[in-house]
Structure formats: C-alpha cells, structure tokens
Amino acid sequence: MALSDIRKNRLKKLKRLRDLRINPYPQKVKRTHLIKEVIDKFGVLAKASEEIILDGRIFSIREHGGSTFIHFGDESGKMQAYFKRDRLGPEGYKFFLDNFDIGDFIEVRGFLFKTKRGEKTIEVYDFRMLAKSLLPLPEKWHGLKDVEERYRKRYLDLIFNPEVKKKFEERSRIIREIRKFLEANGFLEVETPILQPIYGGAKARPFKTHLNALDIDLYLRISLELYLKRLIVGGFGKIYEIGKCFRNEGVDRFHNPDFTMLEFYWAYADYKELMKFTEKMMQEIVKKIKGSLKIEYQEKLIDFSSPWPRIEFSQLMKKEAKINIDEIHPKALKKKAEEMGIKIEKGEGKAEIADKIYKKKCRDKIINPTFIIHHPKESFPLAKSLEDHPNKLANFQLVVGGCELVNAFSELNDPVEQRRRFEEQEKMYKEGFDEAQRMDKDFIEALEYGMPPCAGFGMGIDRFVALLTNSYSLREVILFPTMRPK
C-alpha cells in the first residue's frame, strides 16, 4: 500500500476515535512501572498478582484468531503483551484490531505471566490509545545504507538502532564526568554570551545576524575564550563553560558548523601545569567511561597510560614533512605546500600554511595521546610567547587518534602585545584572509585593567565523544548534525 493510502486509512481511524469521543492524544498516563522494572522484578511482581500498567509504542502485531500478541516498548525496554478475545470481550477485542496500528502508543493494564516458550508477557484486560500515529514505521530502517537519511530522521534512527541511542547516553555520561572532575578541582561553571558584537577567540568565519531592537549587527560566537578571560580579569580564579559555538566553515569528519566546546581558565597557572592537569583529567574520564586506559578507535588501539610524549611542532615538521619551519622563508613554504597539493587561501601567512602542511603530513600519524608543543608565534594570537624563545608559543595541542582534541596555552595578558597581534590579524583580514581574528577593543581595555598569569584550555566535546564511542564522524555523536536540504 502506498504511503499516502496508509496515512489516509489512519486518518479515518483517528476520526473514528474522535467520533466515539475517545481522545487519541490524552494528557495524562497512569503508568505504574517502566518496562525494564517489570522485566527485572518479573518473578516478584507476577507472584504477587499485582496489577501492572505499562505504556509504550507498538512495534509488532501478530493476530491468531481469538488471540493477538504485540511487542511494545518504552524508553527503558521492550516487552510482549497478550490480547485475548475471551478476556476483553468481542467488542473490545475488535476495537483493538480495528483501531490500533504499529507505531501507535498504547497503555495496557493487566497481570504478568510467562508463555509456554518462557517469554515474559502482560495479559491485557484493559487498554487505551495514548497517541495515534499517522505514518507507518519503516520496515527496513535497521541497517539503512543511506546514512544521511538516518541523520535527517534521527528520531527513526533512535527507534530502530539501540546502539545509536546508547552513544548519546554515553555522550551525556562523558559530559557529566567532565563536570564532576572540574568541579572537584575547584572550577566554577559559568555562562557567557552566544550573540556577540565582535567575534573572537579563534581563526574562523562567523555567522552574522541583526538585532532589530537595537539596530545592530551581531555574530554567533566562534569561541568561548574572550568573555571567559574577562571573568579572570574580574577576579574569578577557576572557571569553565560547556557550550555551543558556531563557525561558518565546511562540513567533514571532524567539523560541523555548530559544535560543543569545553573551555576552562585557570588563574596563576601556566601551560606546563595545564599539561599535567589535562593528562590527569583525560585519564580519569577515560577510565570511568571505558573501564580501562586502553581503548579501541577505528581499528586502532589507543593507550592513555602515562607518560604522554611532548613533541615540539618544529621537530615534528622536520621529521614528517622534512621542513625546517624555523628557517624557511614564507614563499618557499608556500611553494612546498602547493607541491603537496595544498590549496593556499588569499592572505594566509606562514603559520597558516605550516598548519595545513602539518595536518596533511603529520597529524594522522599520531595515535596515542601526544602533546604537540611550542607552535610558531603567529599560530595563536591570544597565546603568550616563551620567554627564552620569543618566536615560539607557550602552548600545546593534544592529538589522539590522528585528531586534535585540545588546544591550550599560557594566555597572553600583555595588553600592548595583544593589541599589536590584533593589528597584525586585521592586516591579514584586509588582505583577504577572512578567518583572521578581529580587533576587540573592549577586550584590550579589560586587559589594561590587568589580568593575572593564566592558562586556558579548549576541547571539542563532539570529538572527545566520537573517540570514546569509536565513532568515525562527528555526525554519529551529534543528534541533529547540519545537513544539506533535500
């Protein structure tokens, strides 16, 4: 039967229910137990002959003359229900068969028993409609090869693929453990603006909008950084935020235009202390979630055991890309990048070109947790330089399984130097590099009031969840990833 015909047939049933003054979408339910509770305590409940009321969606209907079996499920599990004509009466039994379909939500009242095959079942002596479905559940959704269709209709993906639902339950648990660890170590959770008059904190293209009430343009934040650092100026010592950020960039395995970030800032600490803290935090969370410091990710074994290697960015480039990044001229570097098939965007400088070469030649080879330290000074305009090597930064990136999980550094708190760095970025922006950071005069003013030495940490939550759930793409761990319209 065509989908349109099925829908018309179900609309007729919906009208019939309303003509009988039966509400097909009642407000209240009378559920006494979750299905999982009934299954776990089945023996005790069945022996007590206790009346049970269960709610759930119908997944199958099997009619055998005067008897009908259904499988139905709630958020906790699935179970079988038994409808018997002799128990319900001819009219009640016929009413069920005439009006209920697979996909409908039902409430059943009855007593527990086991079938001859030993299946835990509720024998129904009363029932009612909780929600009438108008479209049928797809018969072959499980194992659907068109994964994009699964992402578009995540609600069906969750219904038919328990492993998908489990990933999102795991995601929630991971975020909960992150919060517990940070708060146990004295960090306070805060919230900062999503709509900002000037975007900052990262190199990225923003989404722009307009606030009619004040007649001003605003941007969706690309990072949490600059407002959190304002709070460090204001006297907070340890703060963190888990929140959505938005970047108007491409969609691929490790990128989605809206994504979840964890950022925390720690006054009077530096990047070296932060590396130790990061190692401790990640190990504790991995151990709690996975039960071991060794996990499998995309057919690779990743070992989170200490100590984690620390490799200078320049050393890694020498080893894997055969480039001396400290001495090579920007034009020569650009030529080498183009020989590797790397596209160079207008206005990109030496640091941006080096980063593209690193991503092509180096990053994928790093499997176990590794700190890549001391990037070129121009890489991160908000990071402090090393005192003994001014052209290198006091920073690190944590790479695991070929993916950058963390970007962190000793924060630049010199307002004069910060202004100079912003001016350099503005020059790049005017030359055509539209991912350059912009001048934020209000942030400069905040720094001029004084910010203590501070270490800052940023991690993509989606990437961390993908790693711990052995998911190839971020789309597998974002409930509703950005999709091209059909």
Image: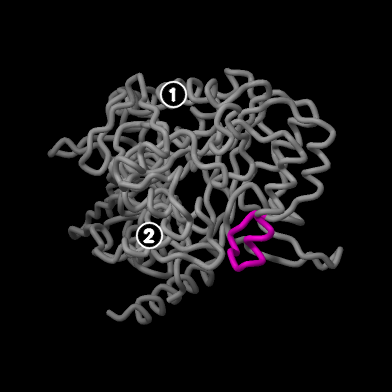
- Horizontal side of residue 370 vs 264, given as left or right: left
Residue drawn at point x = 63 percent, y = 63 percent: 207
20 vs 263, nearest the viewer: 263
Amino acid at circle 1: Glu
| Tag 1–tag 2 contact (CB < 8 Å) | no
Residue drawn at point x = 60 percent, y = 64 percent: 434
Pinpoint residue 137: horizontal percent, then vertical percent. Answer: 33, 64
Q: Which residues are magenta?
A: 425-437
Which element carries disc 1, helix, strand or loop?
helix
Relative to 262, does residue 197 appear above or below in the rendering? below
Pinpoint residue 53: horizontal percent, then vertical percent. Answer: 43, 40
Label 2 belongs to which residue? 337
Q: Residues within 10 Å of mark 2 (few under 14, many from 20)?
A: some
352 vs 135, nearest the viewer: 352
Label 1 belongs to which residue? 279
Using the rendered image of the protein, determine whether residue 309 is visible from the camera's viewpoint.
Answer: yes
Pinpoint residue 26: horizontal percent, then vertical percent. Answer: 56, 55
Pinpoint residue 134: horizontal percent, then vertical percent. Answer: 43, 69
Relative to 276, does residue 221 appear above or below in the rendering? below
Which element carries disc 2, helix, strand or loop?
helix
Mark 1 vs mark 2, CA separation in Å: 33 Å
Query: Where is the N terminus found, in terms of image quarters?
Result: bottom left
Considering every residue shown, the one lying at the far left of the view is: 117
Snapshot quadrant of residue 138? bottom left
- Select label 1 or label 2 by which is in front: 2
